[in-house]
Image (spheres, helix red, strand yellow):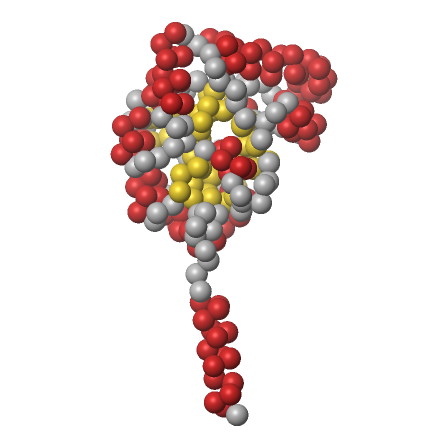
Amino acid sequence: MLAFFAPIALSIISCREKPADSEKSGIAISFDDHFINDWYALRPLFQKYDAKVTFFLTCPDTLTPDEIIKIKQLQKDGHEIGFHGTIHGNATEMLKSHGPEKYIETELKPGLKHLAQIGIKPTSYAHPGGNHTDEADSILLANGFKILRDVAQAERELFGIPVYHLAPRIMRWIYYPFNKKRIVDALMIDEGTNISENEIKEALKRAKETNTAVMLFGHQPLYEKPKNGQYGFSVAFLETILKEAKSQNLKFYTMSELQDSK
C-alpha cells in the first residue's frame, strides 16, 4: 500500500516545488514630465543593460528643435514616448470644474496634436500627480490609449510623519500579470521614497517567481541629493535596478507592450 502512494506523494511535492514559468517575467520602468536632456544622457546606461523604458512627456508644445531630435532618437532606440498631459493638469479638478469636453480640449487634444506633428502617437498615458477618476479613465481609453498608469508609493506621510511603509515585494498592485489590464500602478523610486536596494531586489525576485512584470517610475535623473525643489531618482539607484534585472534575466517592457503581450 505504501509503495502505491509513494509515487503519488512524490508527484504532488514536485508540483508544489516547481517554479513559476518565468517566460514573461520582467520590468517596466517609466519616467515622467519634461526632463528630456537628462533622459537623453541616460542612453549609454540603457544601452549597457539592453534596457528599454517609457518616457511620459508633458507640455509637448514647449519642445525645442534640439529636444525634438533627442526625443525622436530615444524612440528610435526602442523606447516608448507616452503622454503625460498638455498642461499637467489635475484631471479630478478639471472634470469637476469644467466638464469632459473642456478637459479634452485643454489637456488632451493640444498636446497630442503637437506630438502628431513630429510623428509621435502615444498609446500610453500617465496621470499627472496620480489624479484621476473613473470618468477620466473612460475618456482616456476612448481617445486611443491602451494603458493608463497611476502612482503607487511604498511610504506615505501625514504632516511630515511616516504613516506606513510597505515592502514593494508585498505590493501586489505594482506587478503586471499579463491579463490585458489597462489601468495600472507603478511604484515611485524618487529620492525620499525610502526604498532600499534590498527591497528593490526582492521586488525583482518576486516578478521572476510570479511570472509578472514589476512597474517602477521616477522623474528627473539625479547624480546627487535633490536640492532647490528638485524631485527625481538617483542614477546610481537606477543602475542597481537595471543591473539586477539583467542578472535575473528579466525582460524589459515599455508600458504599451505590457498590454499588448499575449
Establish if 45 lies above or below 61. Answer: below
- Depicted 47 relative to depicted 6: above or below: above
Mark yes or no: residue 28 visible. yes
Q: Quadrant of residue 194?
A: top left
Query: In the picture provided, is 99 more to the left or to the right than 80?
Result: right
State which quadrant residue 227 falls in: top left
Of all residues, the one furthest to the bottom in this rendering is: 1
Q: Residue furthest front?
A: 262
Picture layout, residue 221 above or below residue 246: above
Q: How many marks?
A: 0
**Residue at left offset 60%, top offset 36%:** 182
| Residue 255 x, y percent position in the rendering | 49, 33
**Image position, residue 72 (x, y; %):** 40, 17
- Front-most of 60 and 150? 60
Residue at image point 50% right, 74% down: 12
Question: Residue at horizontal 64%, vertical 28%?
Answer: 141
Residue 232 shows in the view: no
Residue under the point 53% across and 43% down: 262
Using the image, determine if residue 118 lies above or below residue 180.
Answer: above
Q: Position of residue 36 (x, y in %)?
A: 38, 18
Residue 108 placement, left or right of 169: right
Q: Position of residue 184 (x, y in %)?
A: 56, 37
Left or right placement of residue 4 versus residue 27 in this view: right
